[in-house]
């Protein structure tokens, strides 16, 4: 007769339902470890990975706005389809292992676990945010001089300016909350992706949460950088357009700061810190 230990072992070998995914507890452990590894990468490596991350996310934002400007696609179809393309850049950036400010907010779990210091976390966020900005600006510059900005007889320019102006047409508190919800979705997708064991798993886990961000009108700082930088290059071509609000350096700076602050709360507090108390601190 098998004893209790053998019966328990036998149950583990033959689960009733096995999705071959990491459990939530395993994901929490992996997020904690990844956070430690990320903040302790050499500064030059972090900078390079952050530049790539900014480039990839900007490609997704570009893909979305090109679909939105296409005159052969109706407004209703565009509203449903274009957000699906937005997530492309983030999916590439995540699976390719680049550095992104918004998902690095999950490192709050490592901080809460006392595996890293506040200085290490702040240093990482500062470098990655700067690198994402450089990557976004570089891609904008290359795209602008490629000549493709004049797609659809200027409709792409109008779409970019209108989208950028719409992002700025909020109060400071609203910008913060839009950033909070934006990274709540993004980090939720990243959390699900960490549970996957294959590229396909990760792609499917990220797909809908990322597309929900632009579909609902939420925001995240890195994606906004692309629209803001490109708008400043083409703003003279949009003279005479009726925009929701003026596009100025002051407004874009305030937006980036408030959205980034909301991103930190949405990803770092609502996701990372919540799961820290559920799965990490509870072990003590």
Image (spheres, rainbow, N blue to C red):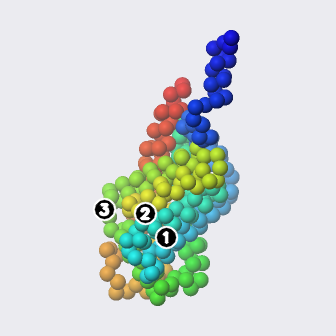
Residue situated in front as seen by the camera: 84 or 10: 10
Quadrant for the C terminus in the image: top right
Mark 2 and mark 3: Cα distance apart in space: 18 Å
N-terminal of the pair, mark 1 or mark 3, is 1
Q: Residue at x 50, y 86 (%)?
A: 150
On screen, residue 37 above or below 246: above
Mark 3 Cα within 10 Å, few/some/many (few <14, many 20+)? few
Picture coordinates of residue 7, whole percent (x, y)? 64, 18
Circle 1 or circle 3, nearest the eye: 1
Q: Which residue is mark 1?
A: 64
Instruction: Please give left or right for residue 175 compared with residue 134 in the image.
Output: left
Secondary structure under the numbered disc 3 in the rendered image: loop
Q: Residue at x 56, y 69 (%)?
A: 59
Q: Is residue 262 visible?
A: no
Instruction: Please give left or right for residue 166 compared with residue 223 in the image.
Output: left
Q: Residue at x 56, y 64 (%)?
A: 89
Mark 2 and mark 1: Cα distance apart in space: 9 Å
Mark 1 Cα within 10 Å, few/some/many (few <14, many 20+)? many
N-terminal of the pair, mark 2 or mark 1, is 1
Q: Which residue is mark 2?
A: 214
**Residue contact at pointers 2 and 3, CB within 8 angstroms:** no
Outermost residue to the front: 1
Q: How many marks?
A: 3
Dot label at residue 171? 3
On screen, residue 80 above or below 12: below
Picture coordinates of residue 237, whole percent (x, y)? 43, 86
Q: Residue at x 61, y 31 (%)?
A: 15
**Residue contact at pointers 2 and 1, CB within 8 angstroms:** yes
Secondary structure under the numbered disc 2 in the rendered image: helix
Outermost residue to the bottom: 153
Instruction: Please give left or right for residue 165 compared with residue 226 in the image.
Output: left
Secondary structure under the numbered disc 1 in the rendered image: helix
């Amino acid at each position: 007769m098998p004893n209790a230990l053998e019966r328990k072992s036998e149950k583990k070998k033959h689960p009733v339902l096995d999705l071959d995914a990491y459990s939530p507890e395993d994901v929490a452990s992996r997020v904690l470890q990844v956070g430690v590894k990320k903040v302790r990468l050499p500064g030059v490596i972090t900078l390079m990975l952050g530049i790539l991350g900014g480039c990839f996310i900007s490609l997704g934002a570009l893909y979305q706005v090109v679909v939105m400007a296409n005159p052969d696609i109706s407004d209703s179809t565009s509203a449903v389809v274009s957000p699906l393309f937005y997530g492309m850049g983030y999916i590439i950036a995540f699976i390719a292992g680049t550095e992104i400010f918004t998902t690095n907010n999950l490192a709050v779990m490592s901080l809460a676990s006392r595996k890293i210091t506040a200085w290490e976390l702040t240093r990482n966020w500062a470098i990655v945010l700067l690198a994402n900005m450089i990557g976004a600006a570089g891609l904008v510059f290359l795209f602008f001089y490629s000549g493709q900005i004049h797609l659809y007889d200027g409709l792409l320019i109008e779409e970019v300016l209108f989208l950028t102006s719409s992002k700025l047409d909020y109060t400071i508190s609203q910008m913060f909350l839009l950033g909070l919800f934006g990274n709540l979705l993004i980090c939720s997708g990243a959390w699900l992706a960490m549970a996957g064991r294959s590229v396909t798993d990760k792609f499917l886990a990220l797909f809908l949460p990322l597309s929900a961000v632009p579909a609902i009108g939420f925001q995240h700082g890195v994606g906004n950088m692309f629209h803001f930088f490109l708008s400043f290059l083409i703003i003279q071509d949009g003279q005479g357009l009726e925009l929701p609000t003026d596009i100025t350096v002051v407004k874009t700076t305030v937006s980036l700061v408030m959205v980034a602050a909301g991103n930190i709360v949405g990803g770092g507090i609502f996701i990372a810190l919540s799961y820290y108390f559920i799965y990490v601190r509870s072990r003590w």
